[in-house]
Image: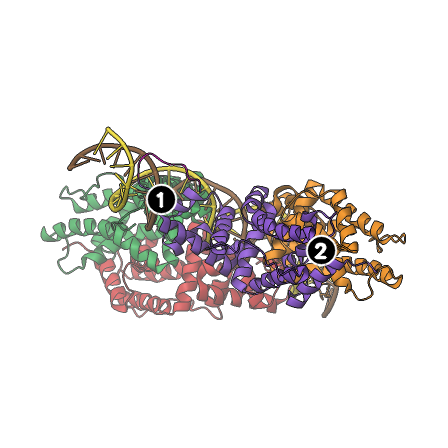
Chain colours: A purple, B orange, C red, D green, E brown, F yellow
DNA sequence: TATTAAGCGAGACGGTACGTCAGGTCTTTTA
DNA sequence: TAAAAGACCTGACGTACCGTCTCGCTTAATA
C-alpha cells in the first residue's frame, strides 16, 4: 500500500498484487464478504497467505482495494455529463448506477464492501477518502455549475443536495426495500429537485 | 418463531427465549455482528447452543429477533405526530431517530442487523416484513393525511416521498459519511419538501 | 432388569422391553458399540429415551441384556456333547463357536459387548455372572466327566483346562490375529490335550 | 506417520508430536479409552486440535501410537531369554507380562487400545504389523530353537504354540475372568507344554 | 561478482468458532 | 403411573479459518 522506498532486497511483485486483488474481487463477487476467506483468496490466487497479510491487514481493506482496482481500472470519467439540463444529467448518472448494480457479481462485491464498512469505522474512513469523496466531488462540481447558472437554489448546501438526490436509491439498494429501476431513479431526481410540497 | 401447536412433549421455555434474545442484543451492542458468536450468546445466556439452533437458524435472524424484541418492547407508538405542521412533524421524527442512534450500543446493534441484511436477501425480506414495513406504513399514513390536506403534491408517490425524507440520514448513517445532527436532519426535511431547484 | 413386583399403577410393558432389547441388538450388530446410541435405539424402537434409562443405566448393560436375550432365547442346550471321545467333543463345540462368529451381525454384537467389558469392570462382573459362568460350568462338567474317566490328567485345574482349550480361539478373535477356521479350532484342541512338548 | 519428503513449507515439530503422544498415553491411562477425547488431549498437550487430526485420523491410531511410543521407548530387548529350560523361560516372560499389567495406568492404556482394536479392523491390522507381529516373532524364534533342540514337538505349528502358551492369560485379562498371578501364569505354561490329557 | 535483505509459495501451528450429535435429565400430555 | 414426545444444558465431534511462524527458495540492490 505504502510507497516508501526500501534500501535493498527483492521488490514487491506487481503481478502478485494484481492477482490477489483480482481474485479477492472474484471471490466476494461469487461468495460475498462472509464467504471470502484469506485462505480461499490465497489458494485461488496461487499465493502464500503471508503474502496477503504482508500487504493487507484484514479482509476489509483487501476488499476495498479489490473494488477500487476493478472500479477505477483505467482513465476515470473525470466529469459528470453537463448538457445544461440538470434533471436529465442527474437522472442519467443515477440510471447508470442502477445499471451497474444489476450485475450480480458487482452487486455482491459492493454489498461485501458495504457490509465491511458498516461495522468498521476505520475502513469507512478509508472508503470515503478513496472512493466516496472523489465521486462526491464530481457530483458537487456538476451541482455547483447548476447553482451558478441559477438552476439550483443558491442557499442549499451541496452535500445535502447530493444526499437528497443519491441517497434514496442507495438506501433502497442497501436494505433491499424494493427493486431498482430507471424509472424509479428518474422519479427520485424529479422529486428531489421540485420538492414534495404542493405549490 | 412459529406458533404451530404440538401434541405432546415438554413445551418451549419462554424465559429461555427471552434470555437468549436479551443476551444476543447485548452482545451485538457490545461486540458488533462480527463479534457475536453463537457460542458466546449461549454461554452468556447460560443456555445450550442447541437450544439456540433449535429456534433460530443463524446469527442473522437471531439478531433481527433480538432487535425486534428490544425495540417493540411494549405498546407501539402507533402514530406519527400530527400537529398540522408537516415539516415540523417529520423533522421531529427524524431528530428522534438521530437521537436513538447516538446511543453507541443501539448504534452497534443496528449496524449489526444492517450488515446481516446487506448480504442476506432472505433475512432482508423478514426485516421488511417485521420492522421496515410497519414503520413505513406509519410514515405513509402521516404523509397521506398531509396530501389530503393539500400540503403535499397530489401526484407524488408516497413510498418515494418516504425515501426522499428518510433515506439521506439513513444512508449517511450506514456508510458513515458525516455526522448525524438534529440540524442536519431538519435541513433534509426542509429541502425534501421544498426541492433543490431555484424557483 | 429387576423383577420386583410393583404395588399399583401401570406395570412395565413386556413388549416394550422386548422391542428395546431387540432393537439394541440389531443396532450393535449393524453399527457396533460405538455406533450404538440411546437415541437411535429409542427412535428405532419407537420408544421414549426415558423409558430406556428407567430400566438400563447405560449402554453397556443394555447391550449385555440384548445379547443375553438373543443368545439364551429359548431352551438352553444344558449340556455339552459327550460321545466318550473328549477331543472330538471339545472340537465340535469350538467349531460351532467359530461358526457362530462367522455371522457378521453376531460377530459385531459380540465385539460390542466385549469392547464394553474391557473398560468396565462392573459390567464385566455382570457378564461373568450371567453369561460366562454358566457356559464355563457346562465346559467344566464335561471335563470333569473326562477326568473321572481317566482321560484327563487328575492334577489339572479345570478352570485352567477350560482356558487352555478355549482361550486361543477367543483371543485370536478378540484381537483379530488370523482367521478363525474349523481346522484351526481342531488343531488347538489336539495340542491342548497332547501338549506342545516332544515326548 | 509416513515419512515422505515434502518439498517446502515449515516442517513438522518433533516436540509437538512427542507431547501429543505422551499426553494421549497419560489420558488413556487415567481415564480409559472412552474417557479420552481429542479435545482433552489437545488442551492438556497445549496443542491445537487440528494438529492432532493432521497426523492421526482418529482416537484409535493415536492410542496405538501412544502405546508404541511408550512401550518401544529405547532399544528393544530383541530376544527372549534362553537358558535352555523352555518351560522356565516362557514362564518368565509370562510372569513379566503379568507384572506389567499390575500397573493400573498401563493396564488401562492397554485396555483402551484393545477396546479400539476389537471394533476397528483397520486399526487391528496396524496393531499387528507394528506391535503384535514383532513380539510374536520373538516368541516364535525362541520356540523354534526349542524345536531344533528336540524339546518341542516337531509337528506343531509355531503360531499355534504361541497362542496356546500366551492366549489363556491374555484372554483372562481381556474379559477379566479371574486374577492374574505369577503362579497361574506358570501353571498355564506347564499345562500347555505337557498337555491336559492323562498319560 | 559476491553478499544480503526482502519477497514469495508452502504449510505447520495454537486457537476460536462452527453446526451437529448424543448424553442424561426434566417437563408435559396421553393412555 | 407408565410411556412417548421433546425441550434443555452439557460436552465432544471433526472442519474451516484465523493470524503467526518457519522453511527453502528466488530476486534485486549493495558493497
Residue holding disc 2: A151
Q: Residue furthest front?
A: A149
| Residue D139 percent location from the top left of the image | 20, 50
| Residue B5 percent location from the top left of the image | 73, 66
Regarding mark 1 in the picture, which secondary structure is present there?
Answer: loop
The structure residue drawn at horizontal position 58% and vertical position 63%, both measured from the top left corner, is A96
Check the residue under mark 1 and report the chain it is in: A
Label pair 2/1, CB-CB below 8 angstroms: no
Specify the quadrant of the image occupied by residue C183: bottom left
The structure residue drawn at horizontal position 52% and vertical position 47%, both measured from the top left corner, is A60
Q: How many marks?
A: 2
Is tag 2's residue or tag 1's residue first in the polypeptide sequence?
A: 1
Q: CA distance from mark 2 to mark 1?
A: 51 Å
The structure residue drawn at horizontal position 83% and vertical position 52%, both measured from the top left corner, is B87
Residue holding disc 1: A12
In the rendered view, does B19 fall on the left or right side of D181?
A: right
In the depicted structure, whether residue C179 falls above or below residue B98: below
Check the residue under mark 2 and report the chain it is in: A
| Residue C112 percent location from the top left of the image | 43, 59
Q: Are marks 2 and 1 on the same chain?
A: yes
Q: Name the image quarter holding the C terminus of chain B.
A: bottom right
Amino acid at each position: 500500500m505504502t510507497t516508501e522506498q526500501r534500501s535493498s532486497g527483492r521488490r514487491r511483485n506487481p503481478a502478485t498484487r494484481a492477482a490477489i486483488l483480482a481474485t479477492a474481487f472474484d471471490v466476494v463477487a461469487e461468495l460475498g464478504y462472509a464467504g471470502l476467506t484469506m485462505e480461499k483468496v490465497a489458494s485461488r490466487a496461487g499465493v502464500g497467505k503471508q503474502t496477503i497479510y504482508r500487504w493487507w491487514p484484514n479482509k476489509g481493506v483487501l476488499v476495498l482495494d479489490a473494488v477500487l482496482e476493478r472500479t477505477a481500472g483505467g482513465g476515470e470519467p473525470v466529469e459528470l455529463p453537463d448538457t445544461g439540463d440538470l434533471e436529465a444529467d442527474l437522472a442519467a448518472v443515477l440510471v447508470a448506477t442502477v445499471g451497474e448494480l444489476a450485475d450480480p457479481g458487482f452487486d455482491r462485491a459492493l454489498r461485501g464492501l458495504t457490509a465491511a464498512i458498516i461495522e468498521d469505522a476505520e475502513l469507512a474512513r478509508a472508503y470515503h477518502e478513496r472512493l466516496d469523496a472523489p465521486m462526491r466531488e464530481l457530483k458537487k462540481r456538476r451541482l455547483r455549475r447548476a447553482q451558478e447558472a441559477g438552476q439550483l437554489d443558491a442557499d442549499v448546501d451541496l452535500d445535502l443536495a447530493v444526499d437528497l438526490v443519491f441517497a434514496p436509491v442507495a438506501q433502497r439498494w442497501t436494505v433491499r426495500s424494493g427493486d431498482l429501476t430507471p424509472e424509479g431513479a428518474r422519479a427520485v431526481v424529479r422529486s428531489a429537485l421540485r420538492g414534495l410540497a404542493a405549490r
